[in-house]
Amino acid sequence: MESEDPSWEDLQVLLAAVANGSLSGAAHALDLGQSTASRRLARLERRLGAPLLDRTPDGIRPTDLAERLIPHAELIAEHMDHIHRVVTGEHGDVSGRVRLALPDGLASTWLAPRLGSLLEAHPKLELDLLMGTAVVDLVRREADLALRFVAPNHPELLVRRLARLPLRAFVAPSLADVPVRALRFIQLLDPAAAYPETQWIQRHAPKAPTLRVSNWNALFALVRAGLGAAVLTPLIAEPAGLVPVPAVPKVGFRDLLLVYHPALRAVPRIAAVRDWLGATHGARRSSHGRSTEERTSRSSLRCGTTGR
């Protein structure tokens, strides 16, 4: 291993190779010859004492070391961009793209009606909303920020608990007077019965017929159509026009978590979205839960299942 620290021009080649899927793509993106890009990557690997890219039939793939290195290299890229903005007089505005992963139901019922205030405050900000039930890998930079009801298991990630949200059984208004024992339950697919919602249904309505779906929006549509009940938090049930089922046993809670990599903590566009999410939920926390400060995912968070 060479003792000299990695250089920014070598790190640029790594970032560009991963972003473009090949060294030739990196060379083109950086306006370099391919032999120059190869030499810079080889120099970086020598200085680190380990390979950074695996060659596969589907293209290059970052090694574990590269995956740990990339978020920090991206932070250097952010700082270099800010230096350029300061030198050219373009500093001061939050701009650029932020990828926010979140459950589809949370996006449609809670985020969408509030998002205008963020975009109005930062008109140069661009957002990619990655919606679904799959847990994105923040270490591999599949997203910059994630809103989750599931605690991460990767020790590097930072977690900010925005709220501890109560869970209740909800129905469409047309079923408000139907006793719980006569209701069908609609739930997300959960073969391992890992979710507290599934566990509550199995415990308190084991004979109830069920409809199982793969995403939140389908679940909301079925409940709103009067086809059954679902165990939800008021944060997303109330905006969907659902009402609680009276006189049912206590369900429990879900933690609403904001998760991100520490290497991105000081990036202005990431910080702007992160702080807006905290402040936006803070306006409702008296009725739906309590906000807490960030911690690493090594800390204990009672959320049922875990993910990266």
Image (cartoon, rainbow, N blue to C red):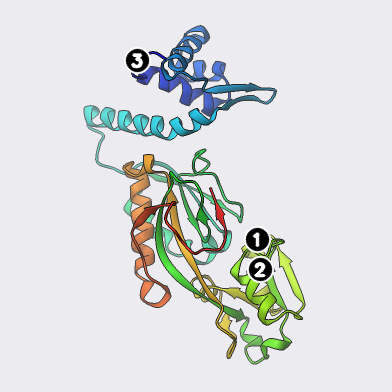
Q: Residue 264: percent from the left, percent from the top?
A: 37, 41
Q: Amino acid at mark 2?
A: Leu
Relative placement, left or right, of 81 versus 34 is left
Q: Which residue is mark 1?
A: 215
Q: Dot 3, how many residues are within 10 Å of its Cα: few (below 14), some (14-19), or many (20+)? A: few
Q: Residue 230: percent from the left, percent from the top?
A: 64, 75
> What element does badge 2 sit on?
helix
Relative placement, left or right, of 180 versus 30 is right
Measure how far apart labels 2 and 3 are at the Cα level.
56 Å
Mark closer to the chain start, 1 or 3: 3
Q: Amino acid at mark 3?
A: Ser
Asked if labels 3 and 1 touch by Cβ distance under 8 angstroms, the answer is no
Q: Which mark is residue 3?
A: 3
Q: Residue at 51% of width from left, 16% of height from top?
A: 28
Q: 162 or 112: nearer the eye?
A: 162
Measure how far apart labels 1 and 3 are at the Cα level.
51 Å
Q: Dot 2, how many residues are within 10 Å of its Cα: few (below 14), some (14-19), or many (20+)? A: many
Q: Residue at 56% of width from left, 16% of height from top?
A: 24
Position of the N terminus by quadrant:
top left
